[in-house]
Image: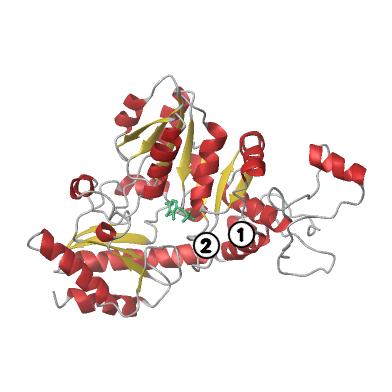
Amino acid sequence: MSAKPLPDGLQLDTLAVRAAVAKSQYGENSEALYLTSSFVQPDSETAARRFSGEEAGYIYSRFTNPTVASMEQRLAALEGTEACIATSSGMAAVLLLCMGLLKAGDHVICSQSVFGATIKLIAGEFGKFGVESSFVSQTDVAQWQAAVRPNTRLLFAETPTNPLTEVCDIAALAAVAHAAGALLAVDNCFCTPILQQPVKLGADLVIHSGTKYLDGQGRVIAGAICGPAQLITEKFVPVMRSAGMSLSAFNAWVVLKGMETLRIRMLAQSTAALDLAHWLEQHPKVQRVYFPGLASHPQHALAMAQQSGWGGAVLSFDVKASDTATARKNAHYVIDQTQICSITANLGDTKTTITHPASTSHGRLTEAQREAAGIQQSLVRVAVGLEDLIDLKTDLARGLDSL
Ligand SMILES: *Cc1c(COP(=O)(O)O)cnc(C)c1O
């Protein structure tokens, strides 16, 4: 079922294409897609041994599937972790993380700037079951330290954040977590292991929404947790088996193939985003650009050290406006004047997406909460894809130039 064994010490580019290729008896060169709900057992005794875990072997695709296993092993190889467990979505990965690590009375410290659904899941859903949580500044390590309680089990961060691209210091947060006897989990959706490997910086677990750059072409919803084999086997595999937030084999196959081009996409899209950020910073109708690759970014030095010298491919900017009502009107105008960019909240696609966070992803916040989070009505977020930069600039200039 597996290809000839790979030599040790391969580079990331090779692993992205070659790691964990599951093969059928036909010797196909592309990864096989095992689209089956269950696996036939040779006899009752073997079935009994497999069900009890005494013997390895595929049983049922809620807990084991060869295509899903390939995707898990390839992502673990890229993240530099021992193991990985795939989930049906990025949020299912956060759900599995919390179900596996937390019980009533435990405490989580989380950045207040993480993905909105993560905040709702931890504070709202897990709050219902007696899990305590504190939400602290993305960038002020002292706030994380001050939030530590005797029952703190987990620190959760995401870097850079959406949409303001704030960067946190992974190594510093890992130190706070470990001194408290807690684990640090980092959502690495924006950087992917190509730009940033959180475990190398001290994090214990890495969360992914495979929906974004890992798939990379906006086709499927997927997620994963990467980390030490013992944690994955003991804490997460049993929950997956009982709770079933499993990734479908088809979606795993799409993500598996997506990872083959992850590096060239990340580098091309990050290069384009840096160019676009410089161009926007010079535009007379742009107030401010938020992008870790710019020298003007407050955590530029940290971002460059942590993200292999890259800013990533997501940037935001405030359009100029005289007051709040005009700000919203101007931002909507710039977005609506585009003819190429897709008006959608997704990111990590080869197609550039453009969105107005204040009236979409952050539309459920009150005006005061939104101002506190720094997300103004003038803000536009662009997740840069693979189109020609000349065309993208023309697309954005259409609205900006006529404000
Ligand atoms: C999209 C996203 C998620 C959630 O992932 P889904 O696959 O949509 O469930 C989590 N974190 C970040 C940073 C995201 O961008």
Whether the residue under disc 1 has CB within 8 Å of ligand 1: no
* Mark count: 2
Whether the residue under disc 2 has CB within 8 Å of ligand 1: no
Residue at x 39%, y 65% (from the top left corner): 271
Three-letter code, disc 2:
Arg
Q: Are marks 1 and 2 in contact (CB under 8 Å)?
A: yes
The percent coordinates of residue 304 (x first, y second) are 37, 50
Three-letter code, disc 1:
Ala
| Image quadrant where residue 171 sits | top left
Relative horizontal placement of residue 379, taking residue 56 as reference (left or right)? left
- Looking at marks 1 and 2 on the same chain, the residue that comes earlier in the sequence is marked by 1
Q: Name the one closer to the observer, 167 or 370.
A: 370
Secondary element type, mark 1: helix
Q: Is residue 353 above or below residue 340?
A: above
Residue at x 45%, y 67% (from the top left corner): 349
For disc 2, the marked residue is 263
Q: Name the one closer to the observer, 189 or 298.
A: 189
Query: Which dot marks residue 82?
Result: none
Q: Quadrant of the N terminus?
A: bottom right
Mark 2 burial class by Cα count in 10 Å: few <14, some 14-19, many 20+: some
Relative horizontal placement of residue 332, taking residue 6 as reference (left or right)? left
Secondary element type, mark 2: helix
Residue at x 68%, y 50% (from the top left corner): 62
The percent coordinates of residue 327 (x first, y second) are 14, 63
For disc 1, the marked residue is 16
The percent coordinates of residue 53 (x first, y second) are 79, 38
Spatial CA span between label 1 and label 2: 8 Å
The percent coordinates of residue 180 (x first, y second) are 44, 23
Q: Quadrant of the C terminus?
A: bottom left
Q: Which residue is situated farthest in the top direction here?
A: 150
Residue 400 in view (yes/no): yes
